[in-house]
């Protein structure tokens, strides 16, 4: 009798582990489908940081600066629109607890950024962008690492750690130089993984 109960318990544990593995695999495949989102947001955020860095370091004409800003606005509108369209297309597909967890991780990032600004203004009575940028980068780094841990993706974990290190390094520099580190961080944490994920989906891996 005890043997039967032990075998049943072992079977249930093995079954539970198998279900968890399958859910992780489903979420990994969905993440590969989401590679385009990583690419789109990565390039948009990279352009935003890099264009501001270039404007602060190079003497552009008013027309050129206006062109940079208009292009940034167009890219932002496109990326936001594409994101809403993509999420709308995905609404009818099966949702896993891992996918829901990831969604809330990134929603929490937005709330954290708002709270950081409110707290900073409440204490300092101003927004110090030299302080804001590195802190925001740390928040994003944390979200990338947590997402990688949930999905057991070593690439995401590594890129998140690198993102955090770039945030720390940028804190030693002035705001215009911080923008360069921010641009590099978006490239390594979003653009590079996004292209790798999309390539794996294209190759059927």
Image (cartoon, rainbow, N blue to C red):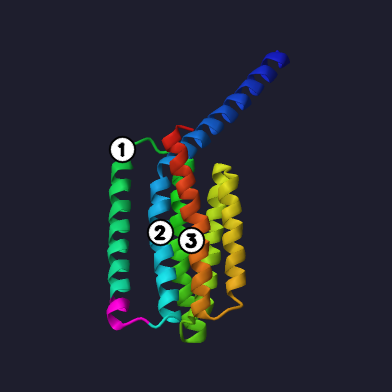
Local secondary structure at mark 3? helix
Q: Are marks 1 and 3 in contact (CB under 8 Å)?
A: no
Q: Residue at x 33, y 52 (%)?
A: 83
Placement of 32 over or under 157, stated as above or below: above
Q: Please tell me which of labels 1 and 3 falls first in the chain.
A: 1
Region in magenta: 60-66
- Local crowd size for mark 3, using a 10 Å CA cut-off: few (<14), some (14–19), many (≥20): many
| Along the viewing direction, whichever of 169 and 31 lies nearer the viewer | 169
Q: Sort mark 2 into few (<14), some (14-19) or many (20+) by Cα contacts within 10 Å.
A: many
Q: Residue at x 43, y 37 (%)?
A: 201
Q: Position of residue 106 (x, y in %)?
A: 45, 56
**Residue behind mark 2:** 43
Mark 3 or mark 2: which comes first in sequence? 2
Q: Nearer the viewer, residue 72 or 20?
A: 72
Q: Is residue 9 above or below residue 187?
A: above
Is residue 31 visible in the rendered structure shown here? no
The answer to whether 198 is drawn above or below residue 166 in the figure is: above
Give the side of residue 101 with respect to residue 88, left or right.
Answer: right
For this rendering, which residue is in front, 157 or 88? 157
Residue 48 on the magenta span = no
Residue drawn at the location 53% of the way across and 29% of the way down: 19
Which residue is at a point 53% across and 78% down the rendered structure image?
131
Q: Earlier in the sequence, mark 1 or mark 2?
A: 2
Instruction: Please give left or right for residue 108 compared with residue 169 in the image.
Output: left
Q: Which mark is residue 92?
A: 1
Mark on residue 186? 3
Q: Position of residue 11 (x, y in %)?
A: 62, 21
Gap between marks 3 and 2 measured at Cα: 8 Å
Residue 142, percent from left and from top: 56, 59
């Amino acid at each position: 009798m005890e043997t039967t109960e032990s075998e049943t318990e072992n079977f249930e544990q093995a079954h539970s582990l198998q279900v968890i593995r399958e859910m992780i695999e489903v979420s990994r495949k969905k993440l590969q489908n989401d590679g385009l989102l990583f690419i789109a947001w990565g390039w948009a955020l990279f352009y935003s940081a890099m264009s501001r860095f270039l404007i602060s370091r190079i003497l552009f004409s008013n027309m050129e600066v206006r062109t940079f800003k208009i292009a940034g606005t167009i890219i932002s509108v496109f990326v936001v629109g594409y994101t809403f369209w993509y999420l709308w297309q995905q609404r009818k597909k099966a949702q896993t607890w891992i996918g829901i967890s990831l969604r809330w991780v990134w929603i929490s990032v937005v709330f954290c950024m708002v709270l950081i600004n409110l707290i900073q203004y409440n204490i300092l009575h101003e927004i110090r962008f030299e302080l804001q940028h590195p802190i925001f980068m740390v928040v994003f780094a944390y979200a990338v690492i947590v997402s990688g841990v949930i999905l057991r993706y070593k690439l995401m974990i590594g890129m998140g750690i690198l993102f955090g290190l770039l945030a720390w390094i940028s804190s030693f520099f002035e705001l215009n130089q911080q923008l360069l580190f921010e641009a590099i961080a978006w490239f390594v944490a979003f653009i590079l993984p996004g292209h790798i994920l999309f390539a794996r989906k294209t190759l059927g891996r």
